[in-house]
Image (cartoon, rainbow, N blue to C red):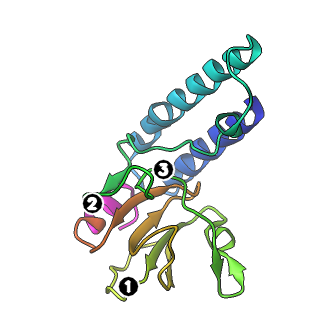
């Protein structure tokens, strides 16, 4: 679990450093590293301690698959009335089939991805952002999703209202 956390720490900081050093993102983006990663590291250490003491058994929580950034200042969810178990901005973007490959293959790399699911909504042009359109897919529901380089959803909506503004704060527009 420490290794998993360290790799996620490195990827989180790496894409943010890349965005700032390439000149598009404001240096304040780096301040979000601690905001996002510290709660996850603290939760992992607490869980590991409880497992070591025999207070908790290994299970789904020890696989660290439920980690996310719903409370991050980089996260914007514009859809209303979502059930708690639905995909929200800040959650890891789900994998799934796409054109004979996997969505994770399309997300892999240091780029952002603008994903539309089950909608033909016209999209703004965002610098250095790949666009991908897929048919309706239950794991996402319908909508528009801006996927970060580390595979987490930065922005989610049913329309593009507010997308360009958020993308600008991230150095993408």
Give residue 4's position: percent from left, percent from top. Answer: 73, 38
Closer to viewer: mark 2 or mark 3 = 2
The answer to whether residue 6 is visible is yes
Residue at screen point 73% across, 25% down? 57
- What is the x, y in percent for residue 161? 22, 70
The x, y position of residue 170, in whole percent, is: 38, 55
Q: CA distance from mark 1 to mark 2?
A: 16 Å
Q: CA distance from mark 1 to mark 3?
A: 32 Å
Q: Are marks 2 and 3 in contact (CB under 8 Å)?
A: no
Residue linked to disc 3: 20
User: Under tag 2, what secondary structure?
Assistant: loop
Highlighted magenta segment, given as a residue range: 164-173
Horizontal and vertical percent position of residue 66: 57, 44
Q: Which residue is mark 1?
A: 119
- Give me the C-alpha separation between circle 2 and circle 3: 26 Å
Q: Earlier in the sequence, mark 2 or mark 3?
A: 3
Whether residues under marks 1 and 3 lie with C-beta atoms below 8 angstroms apart, the answer is no
Q: Are marks 1 and 2 in contact (CB under 8 Å)?
A: no
Q: Residue at x 41, y 45 (%)?
A: 70
Q: Is residue 165 magenta?
A: yes
Q: Secondary structure at mark 1?
A: loop
Return the disc, 1 or 3, that comes first in the chain's sequence.
3
User: Is 130 left or right of 167, judged from the image as shown?
Assistant: right
Which residue occupies 64% across, 22% down?
47
SS assignment for the magenta stretch, majority: helix
Q: Earlier in the sequence, mark 1 or mark 2?
A: 2
Q: Which residue is mark 2?
A: 78
User: Residue at image x 32%, y 79%?
Assistant: 124
């Amino acid at each position: 679990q420490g290794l998993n956390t360290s790799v996620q720490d490195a990827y989180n900081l790496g894409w943010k450093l890349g965005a700032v050093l390439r000149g598009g993102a404001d240096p304040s983006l780096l301040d979000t590293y601690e905001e996002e990663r510290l709660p996850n590291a603290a939760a992992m250490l607490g869980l590991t301690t409880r497992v070591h003491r025999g207070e908790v058994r290994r299970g789904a929580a020890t696989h660290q698959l439920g980690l996310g950034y719903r409370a991050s200042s980089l996260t914007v969810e514009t859809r209303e009335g979502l059930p708690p178990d639905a995909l929200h901005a800040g959650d890891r973007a789900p994998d799934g089939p796409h054109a004979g490959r996997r969505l994770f293959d399309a997300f892999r790399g240091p780029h952002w991805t603008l994903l539309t699911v089950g909608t033909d909504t016209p999209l703004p042009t965002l610098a250095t952002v790949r666009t991908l359109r897929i048919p309706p897919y239950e794991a996402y529901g319908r909508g528009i999703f801006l996927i970060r380089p580390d595979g987490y959803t930065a922005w989610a909506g049913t329309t593009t209202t507010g997308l360009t503004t958020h993308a600008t704060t991230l150095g993408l527009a």
